[in-house]
Image (tube, helix red, strand yellow):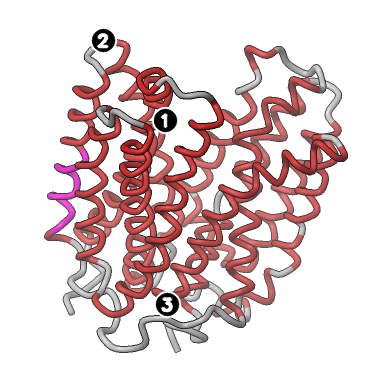
Amino acid sequence: MESADRPATRLATRLAFLVAGFGIACWAPLVPFAKQRLAVDDGTLGVLLLCIGLGSVVAMVATGALSARYGSKPIIVTSGIALALILPLLTVAATPLALGIVLLAFGAALGSLDVAMNVHAVEVERAARKPLMSGFHALFSVGGFAGSTFMTFLLSLHLGAFASTVLCAVLMLVAMLVARPRLLRAAQAAGGPLFVVPRGIVLLIAGLTGISFLAEGALLDWSALLITGKGLVGAAQGGLGYMLFAIAMTFGRLTGDAVTARIGDRATLVWGGVVAVAGFAVVLVAPVAVLALGGFLLIGLGASNIVPVLFRRAGAQHTMPAALAIAAITTTGYAGVLVGPAAVGFVAKAVGLETSFWMLLGLLCIVPCCATLVTPAPERQTGLARD
């Protein structure tokens, strides 16, 4: 296999993350158009949106097995191109059933790309023998910002939803064509089992990943209601908290590789978890808006590098093939995003939204407490060389 430690290979990996973030973000501004075109109520729309998650979860499990056997390159290329080609179809599906089928396919392409690009990223980072994972994940965040901004801009020019998605799809296809020849031909061994039941350290890593994504999903759906319900900001400013969280997380990931290289994976998990927990506490007890919004910055900075470190640990463990481990933690993380907000809603109905966020804080405390279990001794904690 060709050398994984090349600038071109790193560029290709970054482009894969960028395309994934860009693609899913392009869909968000299209949701009101889909609801209006199909004349469906909120309940039906919720079921349709769930199709993305269902397609993703199913594809993630299959992708882990395929990556373990055939390598990540063909899956990255196929799923990235599929994501671009399916995007315009989201604007022309004429019935709820048709849109549901297209969303299932869109979610499957996204889920496959998500797993395969992380498998590829683990191999590239290992070859470089220095932390790169945070930077790769930062490109997903950058892609999300770029996708939502560019799609909103095109729609504001009254180009129409279909024409706007075609332009975005062309950009995604160009990125994938640039990445294709630079991706590793086989980032995983060709042999080995197609399925291994997650166990041992992989289950723990998957659980920590699920907690991290659960917290992020809860912030996305409930943070505005939390701070407006406490009277800290008006309804029009309710989105400021999540906006600051997202900015801080992107910044933290852009600088996270240098930080992790200096202090190691264990300290990153410990102090990142502590800062994130402190941020939740500040948001919940702050008497004024400025302090509460500062808490969202702390959450974003603290949580920014937890998931990249967990992906690195999944790639470094020996309990099961790395590709299958990464598929397991990706699926668990995605389940946290899907199930978490609904779970927060059920708990909030019973005990109040603020109490449910205190419970989230308690869950997040598990991350720094388990840091020593998922990382080796400090002198070897970056996990970039395999035994």
The range drawn in magenta is 172-180
> Marks 3 and 2, Cα distance to the nearest angstrom?
46 Å
Question: For mark 3, does the 10 Å Cα neighbourhood hold few (<14), some (14 to 19), or many (20 or more) residues?
Answer: many
- Please check the rendered image and state whether residue 105 is part of the magenta-colored stretch, yes or no: no
Chief secondary structure of the magenta portion: helix
Position of the C terminus by quadrant: bottom left
Please indicate whether residue 88 sits to the left or right of residue 40 in the image.
left
- Indicate which disc, 2 or 1, sits on the residue closer to the N terminus: 1
Mark 1: which amino acid? Answer: Ala
- Please check the rendered image and state whether residue 173 is part of the magenta-colored stretch, yes or no: yes
Q: Locate residue 109, reporting x and y percent.
A: 31, 52
Residue 69 occupies quadrant? bottom left
Q: What element carries label 1?
A: helix
Question: To which residue does mark 3 refer?
Answer: 322
User: In the image shown, does 136 or 25 lie closer to the viewer?
Assistant: 25
- Where is 75 relative to 347, above or below? below
Question: To which residue does mark 2 refer?
Answer: 158
Please indicate whether residue 193 sits to the left or right of residue 359 in the image.
left
Point 78% across, 48% down: residue: 361
Question: To which residue does mark 1 refer?
Answer: 28
User: In the image shown, does 212 or 250 lie closer to the viewer?
Assistant: 212
Q: Locate residue 242, reporting x and y percent.
A: 60, 31
State how many labels appear: 3
Question: For mark 2, does the 10 Å Cα neighbourhood hold few (<14), some (14 to 19), or many (20 or more) residues?
Answer: few
Point 59% across, 70% down: residue: 205
